[in-house]
């Protein structure tokens, strides 16, 4: 039985045709054989199918002799935190993040919240789950135990270590959980912070009455924008379903590209460290990040896109922070994992301590390095398109890189064009040096070449 729910970094599939309780049980058995953990922490998002899948997964782990600790409904980062903070040998969260509501999935880590992906064990788990040839459960042997654990107080305490609460100002902040899991954490943080929260789509609801929580979709931003304008808020935040990403809006209700937040957070961390601190970034958009890092005494390190690659490179470089333009932000003190709560806390602290709005902090950077935003195009032969584009610009390019897709740099502009891991789609990002018109013209030129 082929399992199409296994992807490059995780498991995602339609329920029940691609992912169901039988498959979840097999995954539990397979994870136990590949990782060989004694203890595993599990949790799940707010989707309606998540509790049953989590139970089947736990049964598979326990039948393999693994002791399971269940932290209940949670976000992906709470599994990361529990795994490293409590010393578990591994962690698994049942979640499909921002996928359609009839989907579900799983994300996996091993000890110290190190990621498990295609080349670090996920394909082995897939092969064992497909074969479904597990040893019979030994009735004489003690089955793995199951215990429930509340890790929320310790998690909230950890989040608060990233800011000096005494320096925070009483900002008015719109928070949009998209009926996913973020609202619960906001409620837990609220008594410790001076902020006034305007809560929309706050209650978790696996029916997703307002659509699947994915703030990257322009049509999903309207409620956040309307609330910022109505309440004259200082900041707006929206999360995806498992809140491992947060998306920020300024006081003018303008959506801020994740790329510019990477630069902001890099600068904040470099201010706390002596010269030479390393910041890891992805290759899609780079100039703003490199400029900020180098001008603040840091070292910018480029990594292939994707959480497994970023985390591995951060560990290797001992980097204090890593950021992707897709709004994934990684922190050394969070076991090099990504969080959707730490970034907005840091941004709110910067606004409070500097007395400068988010708009003022990013306006100069947007002007200095205007970007196209990521543009996706469905194309029959993506590899051929990348080859033809490279040939077209080869003579004029200052540098050509293939770290992740195709990156070509010129005197006043650059672009990255990469293929999707999972579908016949190419993703284009273009940026320039302080020339919005040039960026637009090169964007249009590239799109014409791709069509």
Image: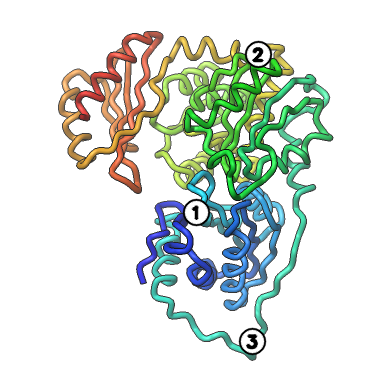
Dot in front, 1 or 3: 1
Decide which of 181, 347 is in the foreground and name it. Answer: 181
Q: Is residue 173 left or right of residue 435?
A: right
Whether residue 34 is visible to the viewer of this picture, yes or no, is no
Q: Is residue 414 left or right of residue 340?
A: left
Q: Closer to the observer: label 2 or label 1?
A: 1
Q: Quadrant of the C terminus?
A: top left
Identify residue for label 1.
102
* N-terminal label among 1 and 3: 1
Quarter of the picture holding the N terminus: bottom left
Rounded to the nearest whole Å, what is the CA distance between mark 2 and mark 1?
Answer: 40 Å
The secondary element bearing badge 3 is classed as: loop
Choose between 4 and 135: the one closer to the eye: 4
Residue for badge 3: 141
Alpha-carbon neighbours of circle 2 within 10 Å: few (<14), some, or many (≥20)?
some
Judge left or right: residue 231 versus residue 371. right
Q: Which residue is mark 2?
A: 357
């Amino acid at each position: 039985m082929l399992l199409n729910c296994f992807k490059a970094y995780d498991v995602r599939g339609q329920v029940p045709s691609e992912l169901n309780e039988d498959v979840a049980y097999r995954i539990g058995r397979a994870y136990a054989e590949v990782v060989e953990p004694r203890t595993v922490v599990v949790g799940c998002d707010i989707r309606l199918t998540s509790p049953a899948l989590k139970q089947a997964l736990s049964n598979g782990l326990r039948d393999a002799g693994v002791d399971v600790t269940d932290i209940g409904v949670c976000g992906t980062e709470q599994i990361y935190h529990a795994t490293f903070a409590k010393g578990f040998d591994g962690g698994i969260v049942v979640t499909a993040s921002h996928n359609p509501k009839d989907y579900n999935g799983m994300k996996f880590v091993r000890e110290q919240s190190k990621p498990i992906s295609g080349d670090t064990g996920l394909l082995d788990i897939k092969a064992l789950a497909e074969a479904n040839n597990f040893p019979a459960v030994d009735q004489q042997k003690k089955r793995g135990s199951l215990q429930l654990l509340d890790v929320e107080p310790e998690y909230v305490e950890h989040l608060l270590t990233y800011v000096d609460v005494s320096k925070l100002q009483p900002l008015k902040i719109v928070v949009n959980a998209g009926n996913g899991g973020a609202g619960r954490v906001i409620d837990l943080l609220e008594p410790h912070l001076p902020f006034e929260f305007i809560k929309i789509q706050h209650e978790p609801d696996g029916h997703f009455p307002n659509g699947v929580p994915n703030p990257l979709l322009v049509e999903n931003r309207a409620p956040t924008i309307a609330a910022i304008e109505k309440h004259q808020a200082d900041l707006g935040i929206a999360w995806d379903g498992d809140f491992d990403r947060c998306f920020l809006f300024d006081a003018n209700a303008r959506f801020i590209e994740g790329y510019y937040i990477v630069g902001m957070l890099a600068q904040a961390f470099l201010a706390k460290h002596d010269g030479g601190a390393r910041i890891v970034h992805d290759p899609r958009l780079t100039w703003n990040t490199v400029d900020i890092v180098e001008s603040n005494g840091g070292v910018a390190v480029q990594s292939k896109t994707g959480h497994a690659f970023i985390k591995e490179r951060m560990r290797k470089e001992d980097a204090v922070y890593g950021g992707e333009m897709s709004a994934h932000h990684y922190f050394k003190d969070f076991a090099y994992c990504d969080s959707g709560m730490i970034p907005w806390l840091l941004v709110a602290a910067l606004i409070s301590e500097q007395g400068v709005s988010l708009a003022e902090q990013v306006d100069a950077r947007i002007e200095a390095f205007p970007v196209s935003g990521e543009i996706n195009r469905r194309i029959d032969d993506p590899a051929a398109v990348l080859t033809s584009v490279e040939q077209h610009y080869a003579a004029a390019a200052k540098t050509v890189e293939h770290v992740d897709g195709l990156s070509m740099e010129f005197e006043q502009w650059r672009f990255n064009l990469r293929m999707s891991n999972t579908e016949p789609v190419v993703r284009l990002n273009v940026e320039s040096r302080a020339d919005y018109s040039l960026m637009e013209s090169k964007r249009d030129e590239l799109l014409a070449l791709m069509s």
